[in-house]
Every structure is written in C-alpha cells, then in structure tokens.
Amino acid sequence: MKKKKKIYEGKAKVIYTTEKANQVIQHFKDEATAFNAKKMEIIEGKGVLNNFLSEFFMEKLNNIGIPTHFIKRLNMREQLIERCEIIPLEVVVRNIAAGSLSKRLGITEGQKLPRPIVEFYLKNDDLNDPLVTESQIVTFDWVSEAELSEIFELALRTNDFLCGLLAGVNLTLVDFKIEIGRSLKYSGEKLVIADEISPDTCRLWDTKTKERLDKDVFRLEQGSLSEAYTEVANRFDLLPKNEKSAVK
Ligand code: UDP
C-alpha cells in the first residue's frame, strides 16, 4: 500500500491517503508532548514502540468484536487504518485516581475507584480540552444520544478487556483515553475506536512496585520514556528480536 498525500499532521502522528478512498496510513512520530504541547522533546524510538503497542491492543480488540480503525501494521512506524470522521471528544476511563481527577477533586493519587469513571473532554487546544457534560455533548450535537450510549459501552468494554490483558503481565491500567471515529467504510454509521492505544494515552503502573511505565515518566521527568515503553512492549514480547533493548 503506497502513501499518497499527507492529509493531517498532529503532535505524534501523520496521516496519508492511499489508493483506497476509505483506507489511510498512520505514521507514528518520535515527538513527545505534554501540557498542551508546552513541553516537547524528540524521544528516539517512541514512534516505533507506539506503532507496535497500538497494533497489539487494537488487534486484540478487533478479535473480540470491539471495532477499531486498525487494519494491519505496514512497517516499523506505519499502519493501515480505516478512514474515519473523528468525533471531537476525548473519552477517558479511570480505574484509579490520578492526574487531573486527583488535582481537580483532591482525591489521593492511587486511590482505587469503587467503579470505573467515564469522562469526556472537548478536543480543542485553544480551550485546553475542557471537561464537558453529557448534556452539553448532546445539546451541541457533537454526538447523538444513541452514539453517546454506544460510546459508553465501547469505553467500558475496552476498559474491562485491557485491564485483564494488562493484569496478565503485572501492569495496572490506572486510566486511559480513547478517540472514537465514524468509519467511512460504513458511511459514518459505525463507531470504531480510532487514533492509538499506547503508553502515550494510558497510565500503566507496575502492579507490585507501582513504577510508572507511561507518559507520566516524561511529564514528571522520572527517567527514560523509551525504556519504560520498551518494558511494556517486552512484557508482551512484541518487538523484533534485534529491537528488544534499544528501539531506534
Ligand atoms: N490523556 C491523553 N491525551 C490527553 C489527555 C489525557 O492521552 O490529551 C490520557 C492520559 O495519558 C491519562 C488519561 O488520559 O492516561 C487521563 O488524563 P488526565 O485527565 O488525568 O490528564 P493529565 O493528567 O494527563 O493532564
């Protein structure tokens, strides 16, 4: 599958058209950003790690009937995905208090939540991605009521599945963010998980030591981000044999 035209470039990824109207190529860059891109650094190998990790999670979700945009990985940094219209919401699911939830509500970081919390943020850098309510979402027609309940179901099923998968390698899924797309293959009628699922978009703690193995390592300057992501990939044995120690 050949890349044709660049149609989008974000902080961590680039999207190219292909000869098929409903399929695009997603290229993972090495840029790491945090705090609405106020902090930025090139982390050599991050794009490769996230390409392999996102492939792994998305393929597993596809296999159990949770639809995602993922079709196949093409090479070290690129994957073929279904073209979607991205819904302008970040959907966050939390199992343990951390990050903005702890800050906003004063809940001790690390406290287990009695049940998962689903939150929605409007994707708008100028407004700093504000938290929005379900009522606002439907009133402003960002999604329909039927889509909103489907998104809840997708988010919670994804959470259950990923929690179990990660627990199997002694990782705790503290929280994560997903983006949802309307797949153009189904004329926008079908919702799929889009973007990426990786340590850039999840909080992952080692279950025993509570060591952070996600983007907080970069946000909080707690060590090597590529070593943390490589550790996650190695727990699932994802990397080609010669890439296990230092992904470039
Ligand atoms: N997250 C993300 N992109 C964002 C904001 C959050 O991937 O633009 C992820 C983040 O990595 C964490 C979860 O969503 O796993 C919840 O993030 P939180 O609201 O605590 O915000 P943060 O503390 O990251 O600012």
Image (cartoon, helix red, strand yellow):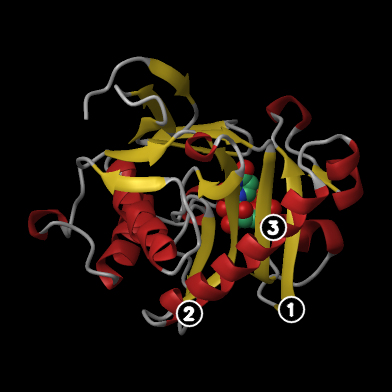
Identify the element where label 3 is drawn.
helix
Identify the image quadrant of residue 149.
bottom right
Identify the element where label 2 is drawn.
helix
> What is the x, y in percent for residue 193?
53, 50
Identified at 44% across, 54% down, the residue is 198
Residue 157 shown left or right of residue 66 in the figure? right
Q: Estimate the spatial distance between the alpha carbons at disc 1 and disc 3, rounded to whole Å.
A: 19 Å
User: What residue is pinned by disc 3?
Assistant: 150
Q: Nearer the viewer, residue 157 or 10?
A: 157
> What is the x, y in percent for residue 36?
63, 34
> What is the x, y in percent for residue 117?
74, 67
Amino acid type assigned to the residue bearing label 1 in the image: Arg
User: What residue is pinned by disc 2?
Assistant: 164
> What is the x, y in percent for residue 207?
48, 81
User: What residue is pinned by disc 1?
Assistant: 115
Disc on the earlier residue, 2 or 1: 1
- Name the outermost residue toward the left: 242
Amino acid type assigned to the residue bearing label 3 in the image: Glu
Identified at 61% across, 61% down, the residue is 154
Identify the element where label 1 is drawn.
strand
- Identify the image quadrant of the N terminus: top left
Disc on the earlier residue, 1 or 3: 1
